[in-house]
Image: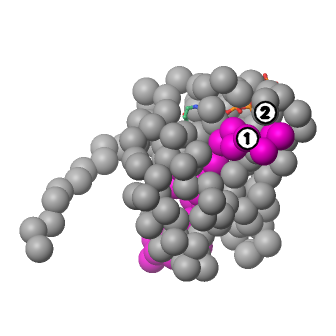
Amino acid sequence: MGDGPVVVRPMGAADAGAVAALSGQLGYPATAPQIAGRLEAARRDPGGGLYVAEAEGRVLGWIHVVAFHDLESDPYAEIAGLVVDAGARRRGVGLALLEAAEGWARERGYREIRVRSNTARAEARPFYLKRGFTIVKTQYVFQKPLAS
Ligand SMILES: CC(C)(COP(=O)(O)OP(=O)(O)OC[C@H]1O[C@@H](n2cnc3c(N)ncnc32)[C@H](O)[C@@H]1OP(=O)(O)O)[C@@H](O)C(=O)NCCC(=O)NCCS
C-alpha cells in the first residue's frame, strides 16, 4: 500500500498518528497525542501551513512552513519541518511537499523561502540544492531551558 499516485493535502487531526511516527524518523520522537496538541495550536496560527503527502490513504510524509517577520530582512517563509518515510524516498514525495510549501508562501506574497538544515542530514543537502536553494551560511544553534 502507498505505491499509487501521490496527493498533497492539508494536514488534519486524523493524521496525528502517522505524523508522529514520521517525526520519529526525523529525529524528533513524539506520541500521537503530543502531535495532536501541537497540530491544533499550529493550525490556529495563520502564519503557518501544514501538509501531508499520501498515496492510497497512507501518509508518506509531511511538511510545515512558517512565516517570519523580523527586523533584519523582508518577510520570508521558512520550512520548519519536512520528512518523507524512509521507504518512500526518491520518488518525488519530498518535492511534492516542497512545492506545496512554496505555493503556500507564494500565495501569501512571500518572496523568499529558507530552511535551516542540520549538516548531518546527508539527503537534505542534494535535495534542496537540486530544487534551487543555495547554502548561504552555517551557524550554531543555542538553546536554554526557561525556568517557570
Ligand atoms: C530530504 C527528503 C525530505 C527528500 O525526500 P524525497 O521524497 O526522497 O525527495 P524526492 O524524491 O522528491 O527527491 C527530489 C530530488 O532531490 C534529490 N535527492 C533527494 N534525496 C537524495 C539523496 N538521498 N541523494 C541524492 N540526491 C537526493 C534528487 O535530485 C531527487 O531527484 P531524483 O530522485 O530524480 O534524482 C528525505 O530524504 C527525508 O525525509 N530525509 C530525512 C529527513 C530530512 O532530512 N528532512 C529535511 C530536514 S531539513
Residue bounds of the magenta highlight:
55-81
Instruction: State the mark number for residue 142.
Output: none
Which of the 4 image quarters holds residue 59?
Answer: top right
Q: Can you identify the residue that label 1 sits on?
A: 58
The kind of residue on which mark 2 rests is: Gly
At 73% from the left and 75% from the top, the residue drawn is 108
- Residues marked 2 and 1 touching at CB (< 8 Å): yes
* Quadrant of the image where one finds ligand 1: top right
The Cα atoms of the two marked residues, 2 and 1, are separated by 5 Å
> Residue lying farthest right?
5
The kind of residue on which mark 1 rests is: Arg
Residue 14: where, in percent of width, then height?
A: 63, 59
Q: Is residue 141 left or right of residue 15?
A: left
Q: Is residue 23 left or right of residue 85?
A: left
Residue 130: where, in percent of width, then height?
A: 74, 32
Which of the 4 image quarters holds residue 88?
Answer: top right
At 66% from the left and 23% from the top, the residue drawn is 87
Magenta region includes residue 75? yes
Q: Residues within 10 Å of mark 1 (few under 14, many from 20)?
A: some
Instruction: State the mark number for residue 2.
Output: 2
- Residue 131 in view, yes or no: no
Residue 89: where, in percent of width, then height?
A: 70, 26
